[in-house]
Image (cartoon, rainbow, N blue to C red):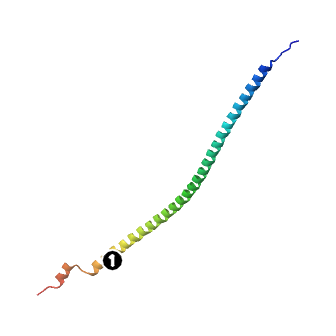
């Protein structure tokens, strides 16, 4: 048989060492908890910012769609205006031709009226 005898001083030192180690671990845990709380706060803030950005992106998407529709309508109106302008120019050209045909030029009218 083998008997192990612990000295009372050694046991107290071990207990004291274990208590100090537990205090260190508790302090480390508190520090980790603080860091985690900080990270959680940062992530919540980032989530809030991302939510705002998401709303802004959706608003910009809607506004962009509206602007594209307005541009399309404006381009259609421009084409219609260009067609109307072309038709008006053609009418003006035709009317000018009719006016020229109805009114002889001033030089040719002089030949009809000879002064004696």
Q: Write down the quadrant of residue 84 in the picture.
A: bottom left
Q: Nearer the viewer, residue 76 or 96?
A: 76
Task: Write the residue at 78% across / 22% down.
Answer: 11
Q: How many marks?
A: 1
Query: What residue is shown with label 1?
Result: 95
Q: In the displayed structure, would residue 104 be above or below residue 17?
A: below
| Farthest-out residue, top | 1
Q: Nearer the viewer, residue 22 or 108?
A: 22
Q: Position of residue 46 (x, y in %)?
A: 60, 47
Under circle 1, the secondary element is helix
Instruction: Describe residue 20's horizontal placement relative to residue 64 as left or right.
Output: right
Q: Position of residue 94 (x, y in %)?
A: 34, 75
| Farthest-out residue, bottom | 116
Task: Write the residue at 86% across / 14% down.
Answer: 3
Task: Write the residue at 80% across / 20% down.
Answer: 8
Q: Write down the quadrant of residue 103 in the picture.
A: bottom left
Q: Position of residue 23 (x, y in %)?
A: 71, 32
Position of the C terminus by quadrant: bottom left
Q: In the displayed structure, would residue 38 be above or below residue 81?
A: above
Q: In the displayed structure, would residue 10 be above or below residue 114?
A: above
Q: Nearer the viewer, residue 27 or 79?
A: 27
Task: Write the residue at 53% across / 60% down.
Answer: 63
Q: Nearer the viewer, residue 52 or 74?
A: 52
Q: Position of residue 102 (x, y in %)?
A: 28, 81
Instruction: Describe residue 60's horizontal placement relative to residue 94 as left or right.
Output: right
Instruction: Describe residue 55's horizontal placement relative to residue 80 as left or right.
Output: right
Q: What crowding class fits label 1: few (fewer than 14 Cα within 10 Å), some (14-19), or many (20 or more)?
A: few
| Farthest-out residue, right | 1
């Amino acid at each position: 048989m083998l008997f192990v005898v612990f000295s009372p001083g050694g046991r107290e030192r071990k207990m004291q060492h274990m208590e100090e180690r537990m205090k260190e671990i508790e302090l480390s845990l508190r520090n980790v908890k603080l860091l985690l709380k900080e990270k959680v706060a940062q992530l919540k803030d980032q989530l809030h910012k991302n939510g705002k950005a998401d709303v802004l992106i959706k608003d910009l998407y809607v506004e962009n769609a509206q602007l594209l529709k307005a541009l399309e309508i404006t381009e259609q109106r421009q084409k219609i205006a260009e067609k109307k302008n072309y038709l008006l120019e053609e009418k003006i050209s035709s009317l000018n031709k009719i006016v020229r045909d109805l009114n002889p030029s001033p030089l040719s009218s002089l030949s009809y009226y000879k002064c004696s």
